[in-house]
Image (spheres, rainbow, N blue to C red):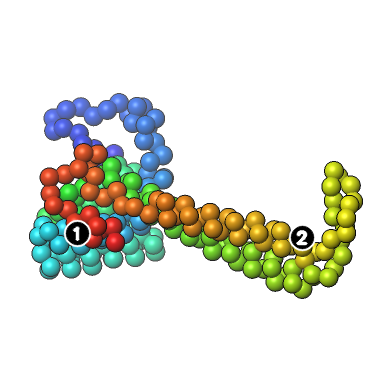
Amino acid sequence: MSDLLWKKSGTAGPDGDVMEFLAGEDLVLDRGLLLFDIQASAAHANGLESIGILDKDENTRMQEALLILSGEYRNGKRTLGEEFEDGHSAIEAWLIDMLGPLGAKIHTGRSRNDQVAVAMRLYLKDRLARLSKICTRIATVCLDRAEAEKDLPIPGHTHMQKAMPSTAGLWLAGHAEAFIDNAEFSARVCDCIDASPLGTASGFGINLPLARELVAE
């Protein structure tokens, strides 16, 4: 592993076994978050332009580089390997490699703390949206089949015994209701987490007039 971003110059690094225990699976998890980290980096760069940290040309070059990184990661041309401490440092290293000193400006006004928090929220929003869509599709299939089988008689059951007569339509519609509930619940959870942590930095804010609402939007 290369030197850790937070290691002080001239000091010994942490014990390898300790690092393996604390961060052994971090890279594996970060591989699923990397595209969302790139997405957040693009929004952050727009915010940096809005407050004059990046000029228009610099942001254009930054956006182009991030778009290239996203494409190369999707098609496997770039991978998140053990030479990196985490996905955040990989993105920064790749940008520096592509853009020189300009690439390092992407870290201005943020910390890896708020980076991972926003990447996690973007990941969850994506997965919740997928879940809601799948549940809606299943409910639709159940309702269509319930309409087709609305007059097909089946026995109801209670206490493990046959009870009042029912229909396959009623039974299928009951399943549809459950999936509709799941779709609505997924959407509500998505609304609940739909807030951007960018700008909190290491947890204490930062002495820059960051355009947090712009970046969140």
- Identify the residue shown where x is 71% and y is 63%: 173
- Identify the residue shown where x is 85% and y is 43%: 159
- Can residue 29 be seen here? The reply is yes
Q: Provide residue 45's location: percent of width, then percent of height.
A: 20, 59
- Which of the 4 image quarters holds residue 177? bottom right
Q: Provide residue 22's location: percent of width, then percent of height.
A: 37, 31
Q: Provide residue 125's location: percent of width, then percent of height.
A: 43, 56
Q: In which quarter of the image is the C terminus?
A: bottom left
Q: Within 10 angstroms of label 1, few (less than 14), some, or many (20 or more) residues?
A: many
Q: Is residue 53 left or right of residue 150?
A: left
| Residue underneath mark 1 | 47
- Which of the 4 image quarters holds residue 144? bottom right
Q: Is residue 30 left or right of residue 180?
A: left
Q: Looking at the picture, which amino acid does disc 1 mark?
A: Gly
- Can residue 33 be seen here? The reply is no
Q: Does label 2 or label 1 sit earlier along the sequence?
A: 1
| Residue underneath mark 2 | 171
Which secondary structure, mark 2? helix
Q: Looking at the picture, which amino acid does disc 2 mark?
A: Trp
User: Residue 112 versus residue 29: which sits nearer the camera?
Assistant: 112
Q: Provide residue 174's location: percent of width, then percent of height.
A: 71, 59
